[in-house]
Image: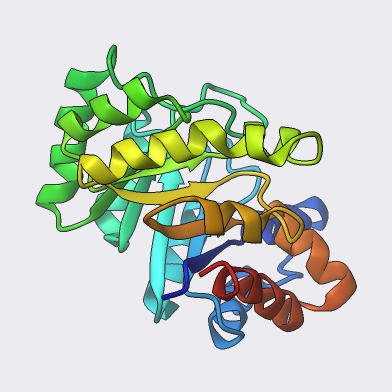
Amino acid sequence: MAVKLSVNINKIATLRNSRGGNVPDVLQAAINCQVFGADGITVHPRPDERHIRYSDVRQIKPIITTEFNIEGNPKEDKFVQLVLETVPTQVTLVPDTAGQLTSDHGWDTLKEAQYLREIIGVFRQAGIRVSIFVDPVADMVAAAADTGTDRIELYTEAFAKEFHHDRDEAIALYIQAAIVANEKKLGINAGHDLDMNNLAFFASSIPGLLEVSIGHALIADALYYGLENTIQLYKRQLVHSR
């Protein structure tokens, strides 16, 4: 069974916002991604709404026929309210700091255990699957299991940076983290800087990987290859990984 591909459409919103107006149309892009084969749509609204806006999320939800994944920091009350209002398939909790350019670290699931248990309970009570962003650290993955989360999302920037130097070394901690997650009955997602060069190797190496969320690289590749073709190229990497 192939790993699912969720397409993060934030960068399409970034392009729209740079000019004003509604070109490119973020809602149509979400529809097209589904038609072109994406298994899910991911959005990551931030408090400054510099790419995906909260209003986008509300408008996208009714048109999603596949899985809808909303990422963000639950310590922002506005984010929690948005998720509970729209009830996506999955909420991915990310410990972003204010003004952060992009996500760059996972949760400290030991120090934040009590908080995570409480907020995860809120979302699960609403019938929303919960995933939490974690670094590939076995202790953090083990502690994640105690928070009540359904899944973890492995933060893959470190893997992507080291992939071209020594791919076996780059993947080693991720394999160990995945083994712990499987032992703890946690579902495994992954994302950040995965692309057509490293995706097949990553997906084929991680036992139990269920889903990858990819935005920046995929949307950049779509400038050259077209959106439909690019989505199929990425899905092909995931099919061949199994």
Residue at the farthest front position: 168
| Res 47 seen here | no
Q: Is residue 125 above or below residue 47?
A: below
At a point 38% along the width and 70% down the height, the residue shown is 67
Q: Is residue 158 left or right of residue 24?
A: left
Colour convention:
rainbow
Q: Is residue 165 left or right of residue 130?
A: right
Q: Quadrant of the N terminus?
A: bottom left
x and y percent of residue 45 in the render? 51, 46
At a point 51% along the width and 57% down the height, the residue shown is 212
Q: Is residue 14 above or below residue 134?
A: below
Residue at the farthest right position: 224
Residue at the farthest top position: 111
Q: Is residue 51 left or right of residue 225?
A: left
At a point 53% along the width and 25% down the height, the residue shown is 105
At a point 10% along the width and 49% down the height, the residue shown is 125
Residue at the farthest left position: 125
Q: Is residue 15 left or right of residue 72?
A: right
x and y percent of residue 74 in the render? 34, 34
Which quadrant of the structure image shows residue 143? top left
x and y percent of residue 119 in the render? 20, 33
Number of marks in picture: 0
Q: Is residue 161 above or below residue 223?
A: above
Which quadrant of the structure image shows residue 95? top left
| Res 114 seen here | yes
Q: Nearer the viewer, residue 223 or 126?
A: 223
x and y percent of residue 9 in the render? 61, 61
Q: Nearer the viewer, residue 182 or 193?
A: 182
